[in-house]
Image (cartoon, rainbow, N blue to C red):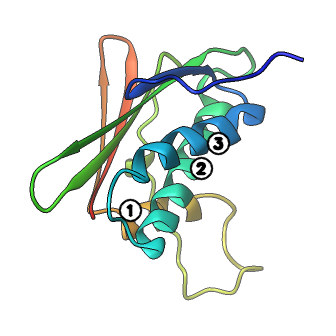
Amino acid sequence: MIETRLPEGNEMVVEAVLKNLPLVVEFVEKHLKRTGISLKEKLQICVAVEEIFVNIANYAYAPDRGNATVRVEFSGAPVTVSITFMDNGIPFDPLKRRDPDITLSAEDRRIGGLGIFMTKKTMDSVKYEYKDGQNILTLKKSI
């Protein structure tokens, strides 16, 4: 059995497939442990990380496969965590999607968009750019 180890630095590259989601979340959590982050903030960040990585895995390269890079950085006082996702998949800005109408019942709502909506509501900032053939999405949260 081959042991999978997380990279020691602040960046990892993984194949953008759903089976790698636990590795991505574990990588981010490993870095968050170094801070005085609250459980609520940690959960908000992990849900956002899951949402973004799942979208990359499901849509960035479909029907093909490719890699995703995840970078975790800290700065400032108060401490701000930045988590950046990069892929060479189909250009797509999830922030341009219209927010779902959360006043409607689940049965009456259109499918999709709720995860990015929750991400935008729980992070201090979410920024997207397409540069040099890469989708680059950065989540920021002061902790």
**Nearer to the camera, 36 or 141:** 36
Q: Nearer the viewer, mark 2 or mark 3?
A: 2
**Nearer to the camera, 54 or 129:** 54
- Determine whether, in the image, residue 88 is placed left or right of residue 37: right
Can you identify the residue that label 3 sits on? 54
Can you identify the residue that label 1 sits on? 120
Residue depicted at x 46% and y 75%: 40
**Label 2 sits on what residue type?**
Glu
- Circles 2 and 3, Cβ within 8 Å, touching? The answer is yes
In the picture, the disc for residue 97 is none
Residue depicted at x 77% and y 21%: 3
Disc 1/disc 2 C-alpha distance (Å) = 13 Å
- Give the position of the N terminus as an image quadrant: top right
Can you identify the residue that label 2 sits on? 50
The crowding category of the residue bearing disc 2, from other C-alpha atoms within 10 Å (few below 14, some 14 to 19, many at least 20), is some
Count of labels in the image: 3
Vertically, is 128 above or below 68?
below
Residue depicted at x 45% and y 58%: 45
The crowding category of the residue bearing disc 3, from other C-alpha atoms within 10 Å (few below 14, some 14 to 19, many at least 20), is some
